[in-house]
Amino acid sequence: MKIEKVQLVPITGGWYCDDKAAFIFGDVQADHYLVRGKPQTPGFKDVREVGKGVCVILHLENGLVAYGDGVSVTYAGSAGRDPIFRFDKHAEPNRELIESFLVGKDVTQFADLSREVEKISQEEQKLHPALRYAISQSLLEGAATAKARTKAEVIAEAYGVQISDSPIRVGIQSGQDRYAAVDKAIYRRVDAFPHGLIKNIDNDFGPNGEKLADYAKWIIARLEEHDVEEDYRPAIHFDCYGTIGRAFNHDVARMADYLRQLAGVVSPLTLQIESPVEMDTQQSQIDTLASLRKSLGPDSGVILIADEWCNTIEDVGLFAQAEAVDMIQIKMPDLGSITRSAEAILECKKHSVGAYLGGSCNETDLSARNAVHLAVALGADQILARPGMGVDEAVSIVRNEEVRLLAVLATRTSNA
């Protein structure tokens, strides 16, 4: 099925892009969602901007169209990530280059074309990952349309794997409304919550972690107050944005001791800790996490998760091979083409590291649904519900897409 025409149109993301350096190290004044401050990360015009992206539309020779969305992650430009996406800067100048590559191509060659997209460059500059992400998703939808198959089946076929019928664990992002988010997560029986946005020592963590410990105790009490069934055993997941490291001066022994205590608070539930430290370089990030994991030992009840400095398939390999963490958040918009995220899942599995198919609250409903197909096709261990930080909407989008997909796949099996 050939591509006859290509369109690039600007879209809006599901949340915001925040200048992370300004929020952590700058003078930012927050009044509910209104924030003021001086941007510190190159590419930002304000410390908080409405997320923007690009939709790539493929017009196929049979008259049908295929769509793919791409955006920047919320913390664009930090920890080795590409700068915030600008349609006029990143899409418009590459319009003709993208059209000339895609027009006339056969969308059924989705995987090969997506890998070729990673090589497209102009003046030795690769396409922004938002563009590569969008193009590959449109190719995936085009292939599924042409083959009259689900996107999951197209992915599974491309990688020669058998699709599992096991449900994927769902995690959420709470944003700063971290108490209401817990109730929402419990009502919806989410598998990993709350995320918590634990990024400030004074306000969120406490000088010795006492605020986070109190929050964890409240969560456990909240589960009891909701009178949940005994077999509902969610993981308690905190994204700490390096606060643990900063609070304890990156002393591995002190960090490990604190995490063991925090695990005791949530026991018998599992504690998942994302980004306990945020170092200045990738190698120091890997080394510190590896030392922390070794210090914790195998029976600590703590699952360490990598995020910062783990932005590409090569990065995933480095963290996995170093045995630095128990799970890696695969930040789909950072990796570019959706095939790169697929390969990252397989890389995690190769090294027996958990594959958390993450992304960004700034993504769209379309990219969220595409992530579900990838997670189901390759058996990711956990998926991030997105877009947004409202919990309800993101969980609904992700779980409903999974239910639809599994229902179709079950019909395929019964008819085989």
Image: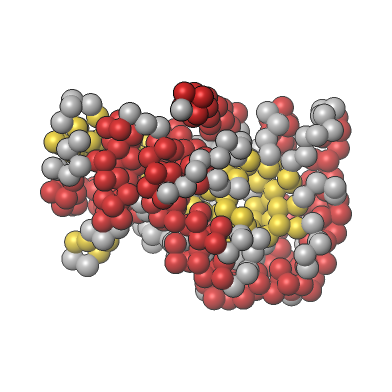
- Which residue is more in the foreground, 252 or 206? 252
Q: Is residue 335 above or below residue 88?
A: below
Find residue 17 and report its horizontal and vertical position in percent. 45, 47
Q: Quadrant of residue 76?
A: bottom left
Q: Is residue 290 above or below residue 240?
A: below
Q: For the point 33% across and 34% down, which residue is it?
A: 144
Q: Is residue 272 above or below residue 53?
A: below
Q: Is residue 318 visible?
A: yes
Classify the position of the N terminus by image quarter.
top left
Asked which colour scheme the image uses, the reply is secondary structure
Which residue, as the protein is rendered here, is positioned at the far front? 416
Q: For the point 86% across and 54% down, which residue is it?
A: 264
Q: For the point 13% across and 49% down, which residue is it?
A: 100
Find residue 164 and report its horizontal and vertical position in percent. 55, 40
Q: For the point 60% across and 28% down, which residue is it?
A: 392
- Which residue is more in the foreground, 311 or 26? 311
Find residue 73 and report its horizontal and vertical position in percent. 45, 50
Q: Is residue 81 left or right of residue 127?
A: right
- Which residue is more in the foreground, 167 or 183? 167
Q: Is residue 275 visible?
A: no
Q: Is residue 218 left or right of residue 60?
A: right
Total marks in image: 0
